[in-house]
Every structure is written in structure tokens, then in C-alpha cells.
Image (cartoon, helix red, strand yellow):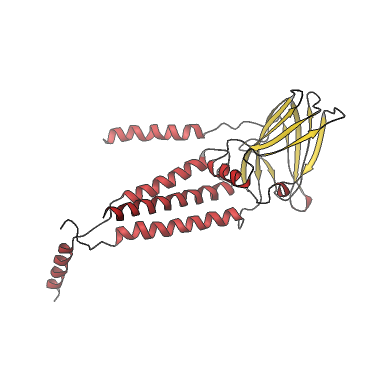
Amino acid sequence: MRTKGTRHIVANTLAGLFLGIGMSTMLAIYGVVGWSTAWPNVILVLGIALGLGVGLLPVRTVRRSSASTAKTHSAAQRP
Amino acid sequence: MTGRALLLIPAALVFLIGPLAVPGYAANSAGCSGSASSVGNHGVPLDKVSVPGAGGTQSLPFRIMWNSDVSWQGQTDQAITSGTWRVSVQNAAWLFALGELVSGHVHGVSGTFANEQSQTSWGNTFSPSPIEPVKLPGTYEVGLTVSGDGGAQCSGTLWVKVVDSPARSPLWWLSLVLIVAALIMFFVFGVSKWTKPNLGRTGE
């Protein structure tokens, strides 16, 4: 369970890093932000923070027993 | 808790954005002065700047094209018979610094010169593309330093914008691939985890 959680955090943080590098470079080459300013660094850090934030969000889980109950309940309601 | 957040968020924004709001310094120099002009496609004049002068700021940078010529001429306050020159990007962002490291231009571009006639006026024409084959569109603060062997110095900075279209350049493709990869990873490891409930046994 812990392995799954760690993998989730690492993968999303990596995705955030990629997004940060991609967006930072794209905005810099289009001249929206200067290469000699702190903005490309800030965008990169924000990307990593976003990825880490998404990774740390809890994965939604439903207990098997609850799922079975819900299934039975919906079946009973069917005409 | 909400009150604290209301205080902390503006404080963080001021802390973060404050240093980023760099005032637009004009092109400046010490120990020398000069001017430069650039041409665009088909040899049409594109831009010109004087250093020191009002132009060459972050908001009004000196515009050049990667494959076109830039002509410059300058005067030094005193004759510099021989020494070294260096052109480098100032305050480079981390990614740009990484690119410089990879391309082997950690300290910019530099060279040596000899001035046997002890002249104080200089001039030349160059194109960025033979110096750095990978096109680098964007806006930069460029610094020039000339150090004479006798101790004479000349230095200056100005903002330069490479106005070539960035579309389909190597950096553009790299950025696009990274953004698409990031979005796929976010979907696979992030969004899909929220929308699809995990029906595994938990806490039992």
C-alpha cells in the first residue's frame, strides 16, 4: 500500500517537473518571460509544487463491502 | 485559520512577486560606449541601439535575428592594446544555465584580441548562428566585458530579443513533448485515480 502511495507521489511530482520545464521553456522562447529573469525558475517550481500537490491528494477508495452493498441496493431497487 | 491564510497569502505573493518586478534599466556601459544595428530578413534594417542610451531595456529590447547580421561600433575611453573579451547572458534562469552547461558555454562566449595600433575605435559585423547553432529565441540581458592586459576595462549590458519565430525549433519541440508527457502522466497517475474508485479491500 505504501509502495503504491509513494509511486503515486513520485509519478505526479515528475509530471509536475516536466510541465514546469515545458511551460517555462515555451513561455521563455515566445518572449512572454525573459531568460534573464526569475520567472522561468518560478514557473518550474510552481510545476513541481502542482505535481507534488496532486500526488499528495488522497486516492479515492471504496471498501469492497460498501461496493457490494451499493450493488445489492441498486439491484433491489430495479423493477 | 482563515484569517492567518488571508495574511500569509498576500505576504507570500509580495515576497515572491516583489523581487521579480525588476525595474527596466536602460543599456549602460563603463569605460566605453558604442552602438549596434541589426538587419532582418532580406537585409531590411530591423533595429538599432546606443550604449549607454535609452533603448536596450527589458521592455524595449534591442531586436536581432539569429541568422542575420548585427553590426556594431564602439569607442573605448583609453587604448586597450591586448586582452580578452567576453559576452554572456546575465542572471540566466536555471534552465538556460543548464543549456549553457550542456553546450559548453558556461561563462558565455569569449576570446582574445591584440590591438597593436593602440586604436580606441572598434567595429565589426557578426551573426549569432555560426557561434551557437541552436536557435535560442527569447529575451536576454547580455553583458559585455573587455579586459585589457594593462588593467583597462570596458563593460556594458543591454537587453536583447531574438525575434525569430520559435515554432518548430528544437526547444519548441522539447517543450511540447514535455508538456504532453506531463499531461498524460497527470491523467494516468492523477485524474484517473480520482474518477475511478479503487474497489480493493481497505481497512478490512
- Residue B100 appears left or right of B48: left
Query: In the figure, B144 relative to A46: above or below?
Result: above
Which residue is nearer to you in this view: A43 or B153?
A: B153
Which residue is nearer to you in this view: B135 or B58?
A: B135
- Residue B20 appears left or right of B79: left
Quarter of the image where one finds residue B80: top right
Expressed as whole percent of the image width and height from the top left, the position of residue B176 reads 52, 57
Residue at image coords 74%, 52%: B41
- Residue B50 appears left or right of A59: right
Expressed as whole percent of the image width and height from the top left, the position of residue B102 reads 59, 47
- Residue B201 appears left or right of A37: left
Query: In the figure, A59 relative to B104: above or below?
Result: below
Expressed as whole percent of the image width and height from the top left, the position of residue B54 reads 68, 31
Which residue is nearer to you in this view: B11 or B69?
A: B69
Q: Quadrant of the C terminus of chain B?
A: bottom left
Q: Quadrant of the N terminus of chain B?
A: top left
Residue at image coords 13%, 70%: A72
Expressed as whole percent of the image width and height from the top left, the position of residue B160 reads 66, 40
Query: In the figure, B47 relative to B152: above or below?
Result: below
